Structures are given as C-alpha cells and as structure tokens.
Amino acid sequence: MDAEQESVLSPPGPGRERQVTRAFVELADTLVDDYDIIDLLDRLVAHSVELLAADAAGIVLADPRGALRVVACSSEDAQLMELLQLHTDQGPCVECVRSSAPVSVPDLSEAAGRWPLFARAVAQRGAFRSVHALPLRLRGAAVGALNLFHHRPGALPAQDLALGQALADVATIGILSEQAIRRGEVVNEQLQTALNSRVIIEQAKGVLAQHAGLSMDAAFDRLRSYARDHNLRLSEVARSLVDDDLDPDMMFPAARARQRRGRP
Amino acid sequence: MVSAAGGPGPDRAAGWYWGARPVDALMAEPGVATRALLALGGGIADDRALAHRICDACAEGLGMDGAAISLLTATASRETLWATDATAERLEDLQFTLNEGACMEAAATGQPVLVGELRDSPHTARWPIFADAVLAQTDVGALFALPLQWGAVNLGVLDLYRRSPGELSAAQHRDLIGAGDTAALMMLEVRTDPGRGDGPDPAVNSRAEIHQATGMVLVQLGISATDALARLRAYAFVQQRLLIDAARDVVAHRLLFTEEMI
C-alpha cells in the first residue's frame, strides 16, 4: 500500500469537540427517558455520519439464525442496505461481528483477495471506497456492528475510530439496557425486539407514504416528529398506524386543526 | 455474579456470555428446536398443519411436556390452532375463559412471557386468576409464551409448558427466541403463500422495501398487513417476478394495487 492510499480521512476540524459534546448529551438525555430503540439508533447513525464525516452509516444486528440484519441506516439507499446484510457470509461487517474487533478497510479496491463476493458487490453497486466496521461489544462478544462508509479511500484516524467505538457502545447500551447487560439471558430477546421494531416502522412508513403521498424519508420524519411532539414511542405510533388504530390524518397538524374546528 | 431467578444452572454458568469464546456461541448454529423448524421446509398445507409441526418441534427441542399455538388477532376470533395434549389445550381454554394469562399477555405486549417457577413468581401477579386456576387444575410448573410477530402483526402465540419448574438455560432461551422468529416466518409464509414456499425465507424479514410496500398496499386496498403481503406475493407469483422487485415497484409508485387486480 503506498503512502497516498494510507491518507487519513477527514482530520477533525475545529468545533468538533462541541459537536461531540452536544451529540453525547443528546444521546444521554434520550437514554434517561422511556426511549424508543429505533429512534435512538437513528439519531446515533445521524451523529456518526456527521461527526466522522462519513457518507453513510448503518447498524446491523445478528438475528437468531446468525444472519445480519439492518436495524438503522443513515439513508433509504437500498443498495447500501444490501451491502450491509449481504447473504454472502463475508465482508467487513460479518468479520467485525465474528471477531468482535474493529475492521478497517481503507481501500475497498484492495479487498478482492480477502472478500471476493463483497468486493464484487461493492464494485457493482456502491460508490464507496472505504469502510470501517466497529463492534457493538458486550463482554468480549459482539451483538452487531456500526458500519461507516466513505466515498473516498483512506483510513479513519485513531481518534475518529475511538469516537466511533464510543458511539457503537452507546448503541449497545441502548439496545440491551442496563438490566439486560446484567442478566445475560435477556440479550436475545432485546435483539429480537429491536429487529422487530424496525419491521413495524418500515410497515408504518409505507402506510404514511401511501396515505399522504410522501417519500419514505419524509414519512419517517413525520412519524418521528409526531412521536416526539406527543411523547410517544416511535414503535407505538407505528404499530397503531399499521393496526389501523390511528388515523394517518391525525399525523398532520393542518388536518388536526381542521378537525378541531369541526370542518371536514 | 450470576443472580438471575432460579439460580445458575450448569448451562447458564458455562453459557456464551460467561464462556471463554462467546463470539462463536453468539454467532453459533441455531439451537435444536430452531434447526428442527428450519428442516421442516415448505409445502405444509395450512396453518393448522404447520402449528402441529411447530408445536412438536419446539416441545421436543426445548424439553417441554406440551405446546399449543393460538390466534389472538381480535377478541372475537380467538382460536387454538393446535395443542399437543389435553393439558396444553386446557391452558388455552382457561386463558380464553378467564380472559387473562401468559399467552394473552404475550399477544398484547409483543414480548415473550417466561415463567419458569409458576408457583413462586412475582410475574403471576399480572394474571392471578389464571395462575391459581393452572395450579389448582393442572400439574404445570413452568409456562413460556412466545408471540409470533411480524412487525406490528401478531401471527399467533406459541405456548409451551413443563411439569417440572425451572428457568430456561441460556442456550434454551436463545433457541426459544430463534424458534419463535423462525415459526413466525413460517406462519407468515403459509398465510400469504400457502403450499408454494420451500421453507422460511429470511429475505422477507430483512428487506425494508417489502415492509414499506406492505404498508402501502394495506392503504391502497384497505386490508390488513398480512393480507397486503399475500396480495404482493400473489402478484409476484402470477407475474413470475421476485417479491422484492414487485415491492420496489410499489415503493417507486410504478405499481398500484386496485380491487380489480388478480
């Protein structure tokens, strides 16, 4: 590997310290409340992208059959999701979870020897040139991984990797909760709950997108702001929508106002 | 350090989270019951036949004395699909009669209800009448109820019972969650694509577009999520296309479901 490819991605700029502080204060605030896991993980991938100057980020969890499934993603990019959960049993995400150690690939074009199928998939689909996978650690094991994708090749500086790992650790705490971490046997249940919450939210995004003619991203934003404004859990709102217990019209302030005034 | 109720069994002490090589165990092969379910494959005619196979596989794989699967979609349509023996059936009947119990709690919360010590568990305070009735009328010592969830949709509840009390080992717990997830996929398969599938297809759970399209078709036709997925699958089958491609077309507004279709 020559010196140029060893070039470091995104040296931390001034003012990042304040950003980092703000991010962790926000995440800590979330953890204090009766939080929704998907909401927390979604904030977390957004912070990861921002703080680590990544072009995309996603969190995968190991499901009960040992496959990796996406539980949070910084964009609706279907190709990114496929990269995250390739059923080829190889790649940086899989290796990171298996070894419960960070896996850095500063230049994906050099990954063909190590993971031929993954490298081919990246070449076919992605504009990504580097990936860094950080384990969601639990007592030396990993329950999943936080994956950072960059369009440019290069290694993340050690300082950034440490920050990424701290974000990954927040994700683990959020998913498993203190009680579960203390009582190891509940772990599988918590992982399953997180994975199922993701499914509920995707179903609800579809309901809202169809009902109001929104994009999936806009539907998710609406879901999230409604849940926050009403102090409800994101997955509870989503469940009510799918079960037809909540009128999608109620999610739009204008429609609510009309209804209050008794107009159609 | 091991302080969970029921005390540390040998399995628990040596389980993946205390063991020397936890990673291998976490990513390990699915447990006995999960593997038995995966081996069933497809071609099972209806949900009653499937419930029968799931109950047998889970009772045997998890060392239980009996199992049942009930549907609790709405209060009006409670139905036991299968019960392996008279005791399992009695447990279902009691819940429906008394309108409370482990299975009903699991359906309402979408979370497993695991009570290894029925005689001595604070958990039974949530359904005291049912707990008293079970202890008075049966010799059941442990109850485990697992909701079969697909997103917001409850596809049934798997109830397992054991005469001898005792908490699940870590390996059994992992196997139970894996078996529940697999059973939910199979139930979904048989309800939305009867007789055609070749076993549980994990892609149905891992593709966001399939869930999003399900939500959209649900609104387009004014039907339930399970029915919406069934319509998507039927469409993909008739058009000889992949489910994921049909789902992507729905999400991209290239495909709209109407009453006239199919």
Image (cartoon, rainbow, N blue to C red):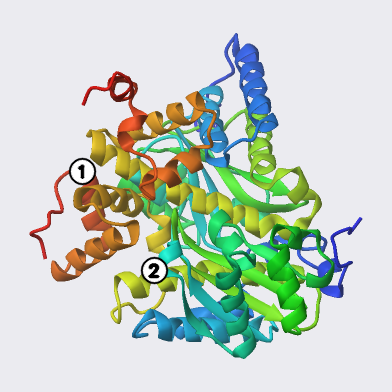
Q: Residue at x 42, y 59 (%)?
A: B205
Left or right: residue A24 versus residue A225 is: right
Q: Tell me: residue B188, above or below residue B138.
A: above
Left or right: residue A242 versus residue A136 is: left
Q: Assign a secondary structure to mark 1.
A: loop
Q: Where's residue B83, x and y in %?
A: 54, 85
All told, the count of numbered labels is 2
Marker disc for residue B188: 2
Q: Mark 1 points at which residue?
A: B252
User: Which quarter of the figure is the C terminus of chain B placed in?
Assistant: bottom left
Instruction: Provide the chain ID for the residue under circle 1.
Output: B
Residue placed farthest to the left in the image? B260
Left or right: residue B113 versus residue A40 is: right
Seen from the viewer's position, the closer of residues B83 and A72 is B83
Q: Which amino acid does label 1 sit on?
A: Ala
* Alpha-carbon span between mark 2 and mark 1: 25 Å
Q: What residue type is labelled 2?
A: Leu
Answer with mark 2 or mark 1, whichever residue precedes in sequence.
Answer: 2
Q: Residue at x 10, y 61 (%)?
A: B261
Q: Assign a secondary structure to mark 2.
A: helix
User: Which quarter of the figure is the N terminus of chain B placed in?
Assistant: bottom right
Residue placed farthest to the top in the image? A14
Crowd class of label 1 (few under 14; some 14 to 19; many from 20; radius 10 Å): some
Q: Where's residue B51, x and y in %?
A: 47, 81
Crowd class of label 2 (few under 14; some 14 to 19; many from 20; radius 10 Å): many
Nearer to us of marks 2 and 1 is 2
Q: Where's residue A9, x and y in %?
A: 53, 26
Left or right: residue A141 versus residue A4 is: right
Q: Where's residue B249, x and y in %?
A: 19, 50
